Image (cartoon, grey):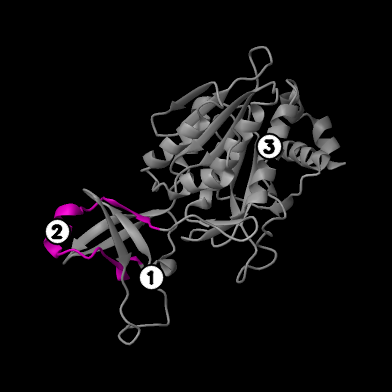
Amino acid sequence: MPVDLQEHLKALCTAPAPSGHEEPVRAVIRQAWTGLVDELQTDALGNVIALKRGSAPEPRPKVMLCAHMDEIGLIVSEVRDGFIRTAPLGGVDYRVLLMQPVLVHGRRVLKGVFGAAPPHMARSRDKYPQADDLWIDVGLPADEVAALVRVGDIVTIDAPATPLKGERFAAKALDDRVAVATVTLVLEELTRRAHAGDVLAVAAVQEEVGSYGAITAAYQLQPDLALVIDGTFGAQKGVDDDEGFKLGDGPTLSYGPNFHPLLVKALRRTAEDLEIDFQVEAIPGNSGTDAWEIQVSRAGIPTGLIGIPMRNMHSPAEVIDLRDVTRAGRWLAAFIAGLRPDFLATLSWPEAAVLEEKA
């Protein structure tokens, strides 16, 4: 049966899996990818790696698809008088945590909420709280909290996945479960299309704390080229027009030193040939994604980046447009299916190719 994108995203996004603790979402991914690929493994760091063999004679070119599976989260740093203080796992924005429901993953899962002093008693209403200012209340006596919760336990946001009007969808952890769902769509499409090269689909761990999953996977797999999918900033109030991209106007194609210009050119040509709407994103340096580390693995890997516009990034209510996801999946599947066995030769850097690119 075709992938039900909304249901797949619900399963991915509601799985509590911050950096270093990805097992719940790893199980969802393994189940979704089983039957779409030829081999499936989990490596020593926890990356899910799927192989879909191509039709060309060996040695076949290897294309890596990479999306990270971890989400931002919290770790218990102190338990005092029945209340729980945390430290961030990844880029947590403590502005959005006031009164936020959470799940404390102690000896058993406890529902809790970040408390806040009444505004009448707040010491300062002119600045946002920091990690040390916020404590979780799980509603239990202090001795029970001390018995159930220990320093080092993880805390995740307790937020539903919610379809909105039209094609919009809201959830926590869409960064980057939406990209994992995109990879699922690519793998499904490639079950119906021949492709010359091997496809190595990677759901990477620990991107939010340093891209460690992508670093180790790229080193291990040694792909000939890599295509990374990640969230990018969506247009919304408070985001300048030149910094955000419209939801529903298509995924983004990134330009900059992190991305091989001839690979980007080929990706653009595919989208234009298929009349797939996309937006151009200029990134003058570090893309802040797994692409940055993959590009310089071993002797270097030609790398491209496709972005899914997302509002409210790193919050409990990230918002995407499902049309951008389906377009990205169709785009990448068509690109991979259209790769000739000799494509890698066109990514070399002879002077003629460089001059042609500048022309």
Residue plotted at (36% across, 43% down): 21
Which residue is situated farthest in the bottom direction here? Answer: 120
Q: Could you tell whether 224 is left or right of 146 in the image?
A: right
Q: Position of residue 79 (x, y in %)?
A: 20, 61
Q: Residues within 10 Å of mark 1 (few under 14, many from 20)?
A: some
Q: Quadrant of the N terminus?
A: top right
Q: Quadrant of the C terminus?
A: top right
Q: Residues within 10 Å of mark 2 (few under 14, many from 20)?
A: few
State whether residue 216 appears in this view: no
Quadrant of residue 187 in the image? top right
Residue plotted at (66% across, 62% down): 243
Q: Could you tell whether 294 is left or right of 278 in the image?
A: left
> How far is the residue under mark 1 from the one under mark 3?
39 Å
- Of the residues under marks 3 and 2, which one precedes in the sequence? 2
- Highlighted magenta segment, given as a residue range: 131-158
- Residue topped by disc 1: 98
Up-down relation of residue 1 to residue 153 (above or below): above
Residue 144 circle label: 2
Residue 332 circle label: 3
Q: Position of residue 227 (x, y in %)?
A: 63, 37
- Of the residues under marks 1 and 3, which one precedes in the sequence? 1
Quadrant of residue 98 in the image? bottom left
Q: Is-magenta flag for residue 82?
A: no
